[in-house]
Amino acid sequence: MGRAPNGGFGASQLFQLLRDGEPRTRTELAAMTGLARSTISIRIDELLDLGLVIPVGDAASTGGRPPAQVALNPGARVVAAADLGATHAVVAITDLAGTVLCDIREKIEIASGPDAVLEWLVVKIRTLLAECGRAHVDLVAIGIGLPGPVEHESGKPTNPPIMPGWDNFDVPGRVRESFAVPVLVDNDVNIMALGERTVSWPAAEQMIFVKVSTGIGSGIISGGALQRGARGIAGDIGHVQIARGADVPCSCGNQGCLEALAGSAAIIKSLREQGIAVNSVSELIALVKAGDITSIQAIRQAGRDIGEVLTTCVSIINPSLITIGGALAQAGEHIIAGIREVVYTRSTPFATEHLSVMPSRAGERAGVIGASIMATEEALSQEGIESMAKRQRTDWKPRNPTTRDPEKSIRT
Amino acid sequence: MGRAPNGGFGASQLFQLLRDGEPRTRTELAAMTGLARSTISIRIDELLDLGLVIPVGDAASTGGRPPAQVALNPGARVVAAADLGATHAVVAITDLAGTVLCDIREKIEIASGPDAVLEWLVVKIRTLLAECGRAHVDLVAIGIGLPGPVEHESGKPTNPPIMPGWDNFDVPGRVRESFAVPVLVDNDVNIMALGERTVSWPAAEQMIFVKVSTGIGSGIISGGALQRGARGIAGDIGHVQIARGADVPCSCGNQGCLEALAGSAAIIKSLREQGIAVNSVSELIALVKAGDITSIQAIRQAGRDIGEVLTTCVSIINPSLITIGGALAQAGEHIIAGIREVVYTRSTPFATEHLSVMPSRAGERAGVIGASIMATEEALSQEGIESMAKRQRTDWKPRNPTTRDPEKSIRT
DNA sequence: CAACTTGTGTCGAATTTCGACAAAAACGGG
DNA sequence: CCCGTTTTTGTCGAAATTCGACACAAGTTG
């Protein structure tokens, strides 16, 4: 009976244009898409019905009727996001723009295995949803970051070194038993990169986010998209060997890895060997903030070591931005200074001319924000919006008594 | 008055599915696209009219009427491709599948400037077109590779070190004065990577193509797409510093660059210092093929040096494939052996488990093939096919005397 | 050779999209 | 203060496209 399948430009594509939060007029949207204004109006009405966009105050008139603007309504639905670390986890409920509505940070042991951890996660999501006063049906997706390699398509961890019991575990399958929504899983550094990009540098087409704490890793955005690599371990710079520490053994079995020289454990160990009593990252940061010269020098040297590897990254990726996050980045600008020192000296001027090396701005919540972005991306894609529309139709139609079904013409 | 704009799935999308050369039945295409078979038939008819696809022999029956297959007709149109080096150039006419129909290889001097070189190129394209017996109207696009950084969007070289007079020159504009078709320009290594991928590893989502000759560069394909970076210089590994040669000066002004140690000029210089009379790359290759131990050791050491940088690349990109091309790659497997030695020793096992390091298979023509692919991609995109269809309609309609224009209903 | 199976062209109906027009809402000059 | 101008929005008929169904074609299999 003839149905044109919403020829490639449904309400979802229109919605993607509004994802940036910018309010726009119908006329602007028509110009951007090439569709007629009347078509845009139909689409916008659908989105208004779903509550996904809302009218915002009219823009200033340019001599005639002032245009009515519509914008993303971030509060229409919520997303659950989790950043699970080795010993700590952040779980949050965010709106569709990635803004955290409520969150918790708790100690966990990732090593207690997927069943325990994911059960805990499910409970926390339920609690947080209640706390925000949002119903289960408002939840459209869940994003999870894990401290190890993840095959993103399937959501299964692969060969994680610090996650016993998680290897090849079907994380989305387990979580979907409790929440029937899309569940997206990725490496924690990757989601931090996504979060950092979205929060602070939405226009960056090429950027490298580096996380420096016990381990050192990076998330790479190139060509506007997160690059995961063939096995999901792209950006794993922690085990690149650097010249300085040829005989320093690393937990991975090799020698001279960046992580073995510039990771927080390595720095603390070296300071203790120099007679400075420091037992944890927070103590180290306190020392640096107090101006302890030896600690500052150690941090700066770590920055130089990281910079050595990043110099190569700059040549390979040619990014416009490098941002530094993770626990050690909170020790002021010293680590950045060390990185800049090396990167700007050793890379070609043409590559560094428009390159910034900046501290992360998203901070501790970069992870959950990124997880939220990753999940939202999926939930509000074509299928996501279509299924939302269908669900709303089936929920609402019964109250709209239009005698239609008996008239259906069925041929014999 | 009411026109649905070919709602997102025109003949071009269908054509993209056939770009791989695989013959397919209409039913298969309907299943792949989700469109109705009848719709597919209309689209296929358009493409048959344009000559872009042709019917091929029926496939074997599976119990009923055997399906009629259609496949890409690579010979329908042609593409001009040029790989311009510092002192040599390859120019070719290819079909739409990137197969070289005829080509020439000549000495040029890129340093003689864009006006001279591009004029030469235009003449050569004319000559080759005539040689193939193809008309100017059969030409749908031109692809050009240049030995330096190029801003791909605009087609302008940016700060090329060995191309005096070319900086910021509007190459596509100049060429379009002679041929009114899309002109795509990119770095020569990038087009070689594209060519190599297309010819030999069409399924590779992540690969690194390394060109080793006087200079050393690489083209990076990640996420299925060529990565050009913020300034078009992604993959520029020639000026990454390596540990071995801390005090070896490089032409770029820095010290210890990979190129200064493992480029052909560096190898030749070092061999001469060891008393071996070798003046050119071809002599060097001859020596290696003759089994000269010193030369082989020098090549292998160059491989190790390159492998040192590639180890980092492997950690960052996580590719499934590294291919080695360029003049030095023709000296047998010695350079590859050196690369493998280092890459497989120093990278993490998880990254190398599914990583191959292979010699380039596309050989000397990788460049022009890649340039052809790049140009074809553009020419046969949506706009490309639509404009071809329009042109053919306007050319042909006059001979189809249907009195339509007077009947146009114009409202007052 | 007949029955069955599978694929291809044709046609009406449903849906979508476009363009035009009228109404709405502000600005600005008299 | 009023009215024409300008710009945007909502509504409606017409054109275009797509779908599904059916009839036909062309082999296979018993």
Image (cartoon, coloured by chain):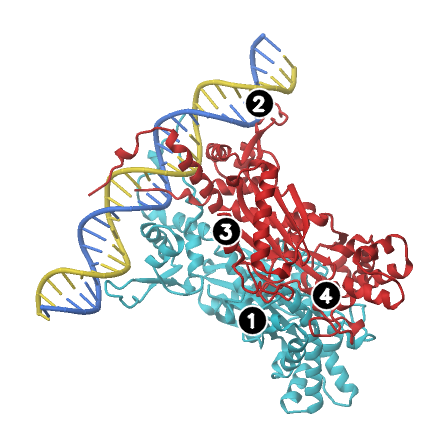
Chain colours: A cyan, B red, C blue, D yellow
**Residue corresponding to mark 1:** A366
Residue B26 relative to residue A393: left or right: right
> What's the chain of the residue with tag 2?
B
In three-dimensional space, the C-alpha distance between marks 2 and 4, rounded to whole angstroms, equals 56 Å
**Between discs 2 and 3, the one toward the N terminus:** 2
The reply to whether dot 2 and dot 1 touch (C-beta < 8 Å) is: no
SS category of the residue bearing label 4: helix
- Which of labels 4 and 3 is toward the front? 3
Residue annotated with mark 2: B65
Mark closest to the chain's N terminus, 4 or 3? 3
Against B159, is B333 above or below?
Answer: above
Examine the image and state in which quarter residue A408 appears.
top left
- Chain letter, disc 1 residue: A
Task: Please determine whether, in this image, residue A160 is positioned above or below residue B128.
Answer: below
Marked residue chain, label 4: B
Amino acid tagged 1: Ala
Closer to viewer: mark 2 or mark 4: 4
Give the camera-side residue of A60 and B76.
B76
Alpha carbon of mark 4 to alpha carbon of mark 3: how far? 41 Å
Between label 2 and label 3, give the one nearer the viewer.
3
Q: Are marks 1 and 4 in contact (CB under 8 Å)?
A: no
Give the residue at x 46% y 50%: A387
Q: Which residue is mark 3?
A: B176
Q: Answer whether residue B154 is visible to the viewer in this image.
A: yes
